Amino acid sequence: MSNIKGKQAEIYQNIMESLVVQEVARQINQLSSNLSKYLDPIEVTTYALNHLPPLYASSQKGKHKQKLRAEQKYKQQITVAVRQAIAAVQRDPLRVSIPLTKEKETNYQSAMIALRELQDLLEQRKLLNQRELSWENLVGVMKKILNELDNPKISQQRRNKLAAYFHEWTDSNYQL
């Protein structure tokens, strides 16, 4: 998890998470393939983490200390929590769960959809000259299009064509 403050990012980590992920992988690998295919490692990890204490660190030294502490004090507890998690999750193979998605992933997908929709709109309106719109060229392409629309040197025919694509009025009072 990170929190931006000014130019410096504060980063912290729950060391217990990585240890539990490793233990889940180890225990699932020891199971038969018939059983392991019905287990979602994320659900097993989540269940186990909810039954273990967090061990946060914000520095390399703290991370090392927490890892040693976990290996000395919580190794057996981690093993048992993961075993119980596997038993709890496999008990109900018909249970359906909708996984959470990362907010950044969801935002990225929404942004990419919006970019594609903008590209489609500009292509339909004949405003995009067979270029693929990307985040890198978006500002430049839009500046060029807007400058072209504002440019008094554009022919009236081109303006009328653009106006038709934008469904603007054809009344002489409103012509471009």
Image (cartoon, rainbow, N blue to C red):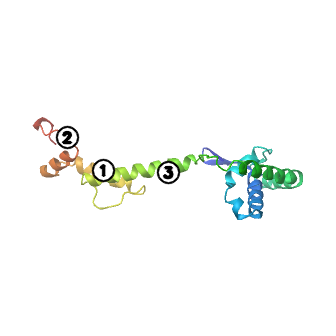
- The span from disc 3 to disc 2 (Cα, nearest Å) is 33 Å
Residue 160: where, in percent of width, then height? 15, 47
**Label drawn at residue 6:** none
Pointers 1 and 2 in contact (CB under 8 A)? Answer: no
Label 3 close to label 2 by CB (< 8 Å): no
The quadrant holding residue 64 is bottom right
Residue 131's image quarter?
A: bottom left
Label 2 sits on residue: 168
Q: Is residue 164 visible?
A: yes
Q: Residue reaching furthest right?
A: 72
Q: Which amino acid does label 2 sit on?
A: Glu
Residue identified by numbered label 1: 121
- The answer to whether any part of residue 12 appears in the image is no
Q: Is mark 1 on a helix, strand or loop?
A: helix
Which sits earlier in the primary sequence, circle 1 or circle 2? 1
Contact between labelled residues 1 and 3, with CB atoms less than 8 Å apart: no
Counting residues from the N terminus, which is met first, the one under dot 3 or under dot 1? 3
Q: Where is residue 4 in the image (x, y as percent from the top left)?
A: 61, 45
Q: Give the residue drawn at x 82%, y 55%.
A: 67
Type of the residue with mark 3 = Tyr
Q: Disc 3 designates what residue?
A: 108
* Coordinates of residue 7 in the picture (x, y in percent): 60, 48
Q: Where does the image place residue 168, in percent across and percent down from the top left?
A: 19, 40
- The kind of secondary structure element at disc 2 is loop
Q: Which of marks 3 and 2 is nearer the N terminus?
A: 3
Whole-number angstrom distance, CA of label 1 to CA of label 2: 15 Å
Residue farthest to the left, as pictured: 172
Question: Which of these two is toward me, 22 or 31?
Answer: 31
Image side of residue 14 versus residue 9, left or right: right
Q: In this view, does 126 lie to the left or right of 111?
A: left
Type of residue at label 1? Leu
